[in-house]
Amino acid sequence: VSCERLFQPALRGRPVGVLSNNDGCVVARSDELKALGVAMGTPAHTLRTLVRQHDITLLSSN
Protein backbone atom coordinates (compact mmCIF):
# COMPACT_ATOMS: atom_id res chain seq x y z
CA VAL A 1 0.00 0.00 0.00
CA SER A 2 2.79 2.45 0.83
CA CYS A 3 4.34 1.81 -2.59
CA GLU A 4 1.05 2.61 -4.33
CA ARG A 5 0.78 5.80 -2.29
CA LEU A 6 4.22 6.90 -3.50
CA PHE A 7 3.04 6.76 -7.11
CA GLN A 8 -0.52 7.95 -6.38
CA PRO A 9 -0.38 10.63 -3.66
CA ALA A 10 -4.18 11.07 -3.85
CA LEU A 11 -4.46 7.75 -1.96
CA ARG A 12 -2.87 9.20 1.19
CA GLY A 13 -5.28 9.25 4.11
CA ARG A 14 -7.81 7.06 2.31
CA PRO A 15 -8.63 3.39 2.95
CA VAL A 16 -6.67 1.30 0.43
CA GLY A 17 -6.35 -2.44 -0.07
CA VAL A 18 -4.33 -4.61 -2.44
CA LEU A 19 -5.95 -7.75 -3.79
CA SER A 20 -4.38 -11.15 -4.47
CA ASN A 21 -3.81 -12.65 -7.91
CA ASN A 22 -7.10 -12.73 -9.81
CA ASP A 23 -8.37 -10.13 -7.30
CA GLY A 24 -9.74 -12.79 -4.96
CA CYS A 25 -8.94 -11.50 -1.49
CA VAL A 26 -7.23 -8.70 0.44
CA VAL A 27 -3.48 -9.27 0.88
CA ALA A 28 -2.39 -5.78 2.03
CA ARG A 29 -4.27 -3.05 3.91
CA SER A 30 -3.73 0.56 4.84
CA ASP A 31 -4.22 1.61 8.45
CA GLU A 32 -7.47 3.28 7.39
CA LEU A 33 -8.76 0.01 5.94
CA LYS A 34 -7.73 -1.89 9.08
CA ALA A 35 -9.69 0.63 11.17
CA LEU A 36 -12.80 -0.28 9.17
CA GLY A 37 -12.39 -3.89 10.31
CA VAL A 38 -11.23 -5.43 7.03
CA ALA A 39 -9.09 -8.47 7.81
CA MET A 40 -6.31 -10.02 5.75
CA GLY A 41 -7.74 -12.64 3.43
CA THR A 42 -11.20 -11.06 3.26
CA PRO A 43 -12.81 -12.05 -0.06
CA ALA A 44 -13.11 -9.00 -2.31
CA HIS A 45 -16.71 -9.78 -3.29
CA THR A 46 -17.82 -9.36 0.35
CA LEU A 47 -16.58 -5.75 0.45
CA ARG A 48 -18.89 -4.20 -2.17
CA THR A 49 -21.13 -2.34 0.29
CA LEU A 50 -18.21 -1.21 2.46
CA VAL A 51 -16.35 0.06 -0.62
CA ARG A 52 -19.29 2.29 -1.56
CA GLN A 53 -19.90 3.53 1.98
CA HIS A 54 -16.29 4.48 2.74
CA ASP A 55 -14.84 5.23 -0.72
CA ILE A 56 -12.33 2.38 -0.40
CA THR A 57 -9.78 1.90 -3.17
CA LEU A 58 -8.95 -1.72 -4.02
CA LEU A 59 -5.94 -2.28 -6.27
CA SER A 60 -4.90 -5.38 -8.16
CA SER A 61 -1.52 -6.92 -7.36
CA ASN A 62 -1.16 -8.00 -10.99
Image (spheres, rainbow, N blue to C red):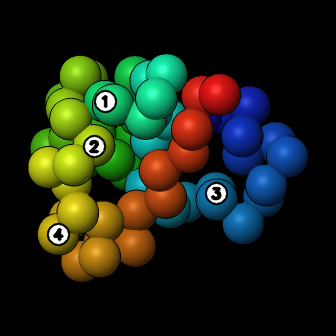
Which disc, if any, is residue 60?
none
Instruction: Classify 10 Å Cα crowding around label 2: few (below 14), some (14-19), many (20 and above).
Output: some
State if disc 3 and disc 1 touch (CB < 8 Å): no
Q: Is residue 43 left or right of residue 60?
A: left
Residue position marked by numbered label 2 in the rendering: 44
Q: Position of residue 12 (x, y in %)?
A: 64, 57
As drawn, the residue found furthest toward the front would be 22
Nearer the N terminus, badge 2 or badge 4?
A: 2
Tell me the residue at 17%/69% (across/down). Answer: 49
Q: Quadrant of residue 61?
A: top right
Nearer the N terminus, badge 2 or badge 1?
A: 1
Q: CA distance from mark 2 to mark 1?
A: 5 Å
Is 10 in front, or is 62? 62
Which disc, if any, is residue 25?
1
Amino acid type of the residue that numbered disc 2 sits on in the rendered structure: Ala
Is 25 in front, or is 2? 25
Q: Which type of secondary structure does the marked residue at label 1 adopt?
A: loop
Nearer the N terminus, badge 3 or badge 4?
A: 3
Q: Which type of secondary structure does the marked residue at label 2 adopt?
A: helix
Residue position marked by numbered label 3 in the rendering: 12
Q: CA distance from mark 3 to mark 4?
A: 22 Å
Q: Position of residue 26 (x, y in %)?
A: 34, 31
Q: Is residue 36 left or right of residue 54?
A: left
Q: CA distance from mark 2 to mark 3?
A: 21 Å
Amino acid type of the residue that numbered disc 3 sits on in the rendered structure: Arg
Q: Position of residue 31 (x, y in %)?
A: 40, 40
State if disc 4 and disc 2 touch (CB < 8 Å): no
Tell me the residue at 30%/65% (across/down). Answer: 51
Residue position marked by numbered label 4 in the rendering: 49
Q: Which type of secondary structure does the marked residue at label 4 adopt?
A: helix
Amino acid type of the residue that numbered disc 1 sits on in the rendered structure: Cys
